[in-house]
Amino acid sequence: MSTAYPIPSDISPATVKNTASLLRIVALSLISGAAIASRLFAVINFESIIHEFDPWFNYRATRVLAAKGFYEFWNWFDPTAWYPLGRVVGGTVYPGLMVTSGVIYNILHFLNLPVDIRNVCVLLAPGFSALTAWATYMFTKEMKDESAGLLAAAFIGIVPGYISRSVAGSYDNEAIAIFLLMFTFYCWIKALKQGSALFGTIAAVFYFYMVAAWGGYVFITNMIPLHALVLVLMGRFSDRLYVAYSSWYAIGTLASMQVPFVGFQPVSTSEHMGALGVFGLLQIVAFAQLVRTHVSSQQFQKLLFGSVVAIGVLGFFSFIFLTYKGKIAPWTGRFYSLWDTGYAKKYIPIIASVSEHQPTAWPSFFMDLQFLIFLFPAGVVLCFRELRDEHLFVIIYAVMASYFAGVMVRLMLTLTPVVCVASAVALSTLLDTYIDPTEPVADDDTRSEADSTVTSNGSSAPSKKAKKAAAAAVSAPSKGPLSDLVAAATGSAHAGTGNITTGIFGLDSRGVVVLNVVFMLMFFVFHCTWVTSNAYSSPSVVLASTNPDGSQHIIDDFREAYYWLRQNTPQDAVVMSWWDYGYQIAGMADRPTLVDNNTWNNTHIATVGKAMSSSEEVAYPILRKHDVDYVLVIFGGLIGYSGDDINKFLWMVRIAQGVWPEEIQEPNYFTSQGEYRIDDRASQTMKDSLMYKMSYYRFNELFGGNPGTDRVRQQQVPKEGPTLDYLDEAFTSENWIVSLFPSLSYLAPHHFFRSTSDASNCICSRNSDSDFVSMSLLVLPRW
Amino acid sequence: MKFLLFASLCSLLALPSSFAATPQEQLALLAAAGNGVIKLNTETYDLLTSPKRTWSASIQLTALDPRRRCGPCKEFNPAWHAVARAWHNVPAATKNEHFFAMLDFDEGPTVFQKLGIASAPIVFNYPAADGPRKPKNGNLSPVKYDFSEGFDATPLASFLSKYTPIDIPYKDPIDWMRWITISIAALGAALLLRFISPIVQNKWSWAVVTVITSLVMTSGYMFTRIRNVPFNGGNGNWIAAGYQNQFGQEVQVVSFIYGLLSFAFLMLILVVPLQSSPQRQRLQVYLWTGVIMIIYSVLISLFRVKNRGYPFKLFL
């Protein structure tokens, strides 16, 4: 057997095996290191700080857990949120994240390592990303082999689609959920392959952990039954499937019901009915199989088949009937909006208003997945070539996840793992083919010419190879690459014995392809690093901009304002703001808020929206009724921060309109030409609204009395600035991002910090013509 | 009887008689004549929206004349008439509490000027200004209908029902054609199943469906569906500016590029190793590697158009 390049022949197989496994361990630990390191940009560029919105709540809850213990956390009623309603925190959270960090914190303290709980929270996501890389390795190993597993682990370690949710400081449920997702899937595949109740139980345990950690567990709840259903429909029912599914479903469902927030949902809502239905179906099919082995009569088997179908149909209709009678809750709105894409905008504007729930344009896919996005279909095709049970799982996952990721930006997170797995399968197959040193036996040109004529004729042929080619030609009687593709796909060419006829000739062909792959991988690394450092590592609590001379300018207005609140107001001063900032106010300023990112009470949010969008006279009684002491407004017009309240204002109007259609009407906030403007031509309703007045209050003074320019909207504000009669300005942060307005009845400490000189010298890259940069700055409220 | 005959004669002649009946009765007759919709002109508009009205009214301001070239007006008009006809079927006592009317631009340009309207169609809902149905909060200004849910009749009816004395009994007509088509298609599929079952059972037909689905989805197809973006921007401009935006044509181009790159990789993996002649194989290796490099460069340059801050580029 000739080889393309010399390979040492005097090494024992045991040495090869040991070296390979050592290299794998080294590679995996390096991948883990890279995964953790690439998530630390945020800590290095800024500081060890909790990011964004939801993480602030998780952090606050974790602090309670760490300080007071689990039972206090479990029974925690938070009177400062949703003032005056309060919130039962223990029963309305997925506690998995907090408990995880609490356990880590306690272990570290048990080992006498006095680590601050904040650092545990900040570094939890990078730590779990290393575990995700390992889980993906295990999963992909089941699909192909170890080398594909290593590639997949490397991909998921640094791919921006996953980093976007797991940088240091992004202390959110997704941080641990993707690891749990991949590990549950791995256990499921393992259970299915071996028919092992043990792995089924492990899958159920991790499923329970996932249920406790993230609302996205519904994805697993539907993926596994769908896989099982497809297997049954393809006639691949086996005892292995029965054991794996039954053990997973029975234990997993019982365990998931222990989470208070989930409760009886697994037996009463539509999202979970698929799993229950498949469980029932498997029992019926298993019973039918059992009876078939014992009974030989043809008629009886027919009868059995009929009864199986009848029971299935009956079950389906009883499900519809129960839904109709209200015994089973229909799809929840958030879930339903995935299928009927117009649903959310019509009926639940609060869901449609969140920028993460917007559909995904193609640049986002490319940005998050780069070259994996086009290797991924190739990997799916390779899965079809082999089509073992576990490959079906990847195929179903690929279709479902690409649809979901297209509908909602945030679901890119569920697409990313399968893209990594499929493209790792494709790339590792490519590398296997082109690194393999075995040289095939070359046919001379005349032979191959003869072969191809034989192929096209489809007649019998003398040589072994021609027979195979003829076999291929039967299924696709065309000549050339297509028939080759079919031959390759149907696997007939792999039956070669004796002389190896498939393979790559020569070193240069190998070299070209391998170099190309290496180059693409390197480019991928550069891309990921760039995206991570530029787009996904901003804490969004602290903003960075570049000064004209290239140095970094930190804008720390949020914390400035929250600390002002903390230090200058009484502990029980109620702050009203739009819901995006509720968790931050609670976390950093420690003051009661009217609404926060939990968004469970639409009417309460609409009340705030109404107050913001009505005139002062209308808004003031609302503020008084809710004991509001301060109103917090985010305004980016001075420095060009596009995620401010004026840009979110239309959603406030829309949500208020949903509850009070008589009083708030969206069209009134547009000019007669239907434009959304803030300058002289703005509609009167707009100019009278509390939000507009608070945002532009005394704005012109910064420009020496001349009309100032709003840098986000690129419009000049009216020469005559708005006046406030009922509210007064209490505090405005350095760059004017946060303003606080106390109600007049409250004795406000008049404290102004305004650096008027700042208006001219703060030129922010955020507002530059590059769309991308301003994208990275959009405030992404997430839940 | 004689009086009624006379009055309806008057209304047929579109002469709002001022001596015979109260304004409300006149309007009722006009509505009856127009099959539920009062065709307004400047005078009847003032009558309908008089400050002493005890009735409420929904008015469609439109421009149906072909010279005005208002496509949306034509599109919306049937829905308006359907809802008005539904209201026309309620009992007479409640029916005359609320009127449906329409004003064409060519019939009353002065009204359009007075209201400062430059676009059509627009739906205004005038609450009753007097009498028992006067709104409690005293807000008498007309409410504008927001077309964000399209020109369909159902959302219009549910919006207007908030202002009518009783809900508008509007029901979507059953789309018989659609159901017939669906049932014929289902029947046909069931019959065809015998002939196409080899295709259905072949895994490669499923593979094609799967791959095309994921290619189309990852090229932003759902974005174009949900946002209703145009196919292209006109004047040969098919790339939408902005990172978070795209046109319909971009889906085709991008999914084609992805598909071609995937195909090139599959050729390298599956087909090239089967070649038994070294020369042909070498040629194919270089061909597909070249295709990958060039198309990948095209993709990167396309991405740079969308995301101008992107620092990397390949050969293009």
Image (cartoon, grey):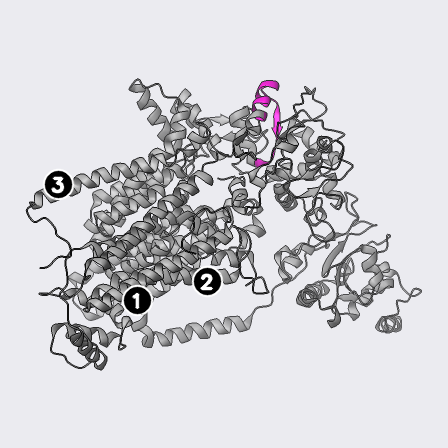
Find residue A105 and report its horizontal and vertical position in percent.
Answer: 35, 24
Given residues A173 and A227, the one toward you in this image is A173
Q: Does the segment drawn in magenta span residue A574?
A: yes
Given residues B47 and A482, the one toward you in this image is A482
Looking at the rendered image, the disc whose residue lies closer to the viewer, 2 or 1, is 2
For the question of whether residue B281 can be seen, the reply is yes
Marks 1 & 3, CB-CB < 8 Å contact:
no
For the question of whether residue A287 can be seen, the reply is no
Question: Callout 3, which amino acid?
Answer: Asn
On the image, numbered disc 3 is attached to which residue? A18
Quote the CA–CA distance across marks 1 and 3. 40 Å
Disc number at residue B253? 2
Q: Of all residues shown, which one is farthest toward the right?
A: B19
Disc 1 and disc 3 on one polypeptide chain: no
Looking at the rendering, the stretch of residues picked out in magenta corresponds to: A561-579
Number of numbered tags placed on the structure image:
3
